[in-house]
């Protein structure tokens, strides 16, 4: 582990070290199974137990009632861009409201338009996606098929601090890919919430979909089988072979959140403290570090900022890397720096980056 760096990757991202160590211990032979988890049938008792444990931990962390199905699917978050409108918009005779606050919402809208009518109820495009709406910034529609938003835009680093408003009885749908399990949530406010695992919750390859059971009935029988949520729900996410190894690691991360961290309130407090260190440093050097997000929309997960010029930006990345602070380059579409500080980023990592930033600004500002 001596060579491990502080990894600020936006995803796939750092995993908790105790989880990786357990995986290592069990890699060749899962206790009692005589084989690696990768080599076990998904229909055997050992794997079914692993999957049920993973689901139980997620249900317990988020207090999810039996009114909701918890699905573990393949296809990444991107497949949800299509599955959601395929099940809930196609043939509904309604339009779907989308709140556009960044790159991932834009992609979701592109896919939804292939399925039906999209009403972009709010867009932050004009301000280069530096904010999220507050009540009154857009009109809700009581007749919408659903209202969709992305709770944390990973590329721009803007995050909703609470759920947006919907029309009466309109299902709220969230792409929570980059803030899932980073803070408590009231699932009862949602019709559907989904997240790919590879930021806060596990490795790439599994996407968690939490869906209110009444919505399972809306997909048409003519949908391709994999795309119909109902098939997955009625087969315990085993309509086809699920991504067994990612689910196993996801289960371990959820257990780590329960037992080592002590639940999502504590996780949120830790995440808040880490982000406060970085935003505090940006605010200390406002002429030097140009934060992307409006202050009240700042993401607790992805801290995005720029430097006065490209030369300093390159120098920042190179010098940080020498101090084992790695993968800080912003997304190619936005530029600048993006420090992703998900659940598994230790406090010391955020502290090391904050103190590097402070020194760098003092030397070069
Ligand atoms: N939504 C958000 C908010 C994301 O951050 C990402 C991945 N970075 C995606 C969707 C797409 O995820 P995937 O690559 O798993 O399809």
Image (cartoon, rainbow, N blue to C red):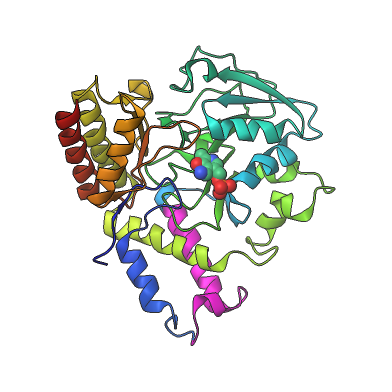
Disc count in the image?
Answer: 0
Q: Is residue 48 above or below residue 335?
A: below
Q: Is residue 24 above or below residue 75?
A: below
Task: Let me know if residue 67 appears in the view.
Answer: no
Instruction: Identify the magenta region.
Output: 34-60
Say which residue appears at 68% left-offset and 24% top-offset.
Answer: 144
The verdict on residue 48 being magenta is yes
Q: Quadrant of the C terminus?
A: top left
Where is ligand 1, by quadrant? top right
In the depicted view, which residue is nearer to us: 17 or 87? Answer: 17
Q: Position of residue 246 (x, y in %)?
A: 51, 63
Task: Let me know if residue 39 appears in the view.
Answer: yes
Q: Magenta region, mostly helix, strand or loop?
A: helix
In the depicted view, which residue is nearer to us: 58 or 240? Answer: 240
Q: Position of residue 333 (x, y in %)?
A: 50, 33
The answer to which quarter of the image holds residue 3 is bottom left
């Amino acid at each position: 582990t001596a060579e491990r760096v502080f990894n600020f990757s936006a995803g796939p991202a750092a995993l908790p070290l105790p989880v990786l160590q357990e995986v290592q211990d069990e890699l060749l032979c899962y206790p009692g199974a005589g084989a690696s988890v990768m080599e076990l049938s998904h229909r055997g008792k050992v794997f079914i137990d692993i999957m049920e444990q993973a689901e139980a931990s997620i249900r317990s962390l988020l207090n999810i009632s039996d009114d909701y199905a918890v699905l573990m699917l393949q296809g990444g978050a991107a497949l949800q861009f299509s599955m959601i409108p395929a099940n809930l918009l196609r043939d509904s005779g309604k339009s779907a409201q989308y709140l556009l606050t960044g790159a991932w919402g834009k992609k979701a809208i592109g896919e939804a338009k292939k399925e039906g009518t999209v009403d972009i109820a709010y867009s932050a495009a004009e301000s280069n996606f530096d904010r999220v709406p507050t009540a009154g910034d857009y009109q809700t529609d009581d007749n919408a098929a659903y209202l969709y938003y992305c709770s944390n835009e990973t590329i721009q680093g803007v995050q909703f601090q609470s759920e947006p408003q919907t029309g009466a009885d309109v299902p709220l749908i969230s792409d929570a890919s980059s803030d899932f399990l980073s803070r408590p949530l009231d699932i009862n406010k949602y019709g559907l919430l989904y997240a790919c695992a590879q930021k806060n919750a596990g490795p790439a390859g599994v996407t968690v979909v939490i869906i209110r059971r009444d919505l399972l009935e809306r997909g048409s029988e003519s949908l391709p089988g994999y795309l119909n949520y109902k098939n997955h729900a009625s087969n315990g996410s085993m309509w086809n072979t699920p991504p067994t190894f990612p689910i196993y690691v996801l289960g371990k991360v959820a257990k780590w959140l329960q037992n080592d961290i002590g639940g999502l309130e504590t996780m949120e407090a830790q995440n808040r403290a880490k982000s406060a260190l970085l935003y505090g440093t940006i605010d200390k050097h406002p002429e030097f570090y140009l934060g992307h997000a409006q202050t009240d929309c700042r993401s607790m997960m992805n801290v995005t900022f720029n430097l006065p010029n490209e030369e300093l930006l390159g120098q920042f990345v190179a010098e940080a890397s020498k101090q084992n602070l790695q993968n800080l380059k912003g997304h190619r579409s936005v530029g600048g720096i993006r420090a992703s500080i998900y659940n598994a980023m230790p406090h010391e990592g955020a502290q090391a980056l904050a103190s590097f930033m402070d020194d760098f600004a003092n030397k070069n500002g």
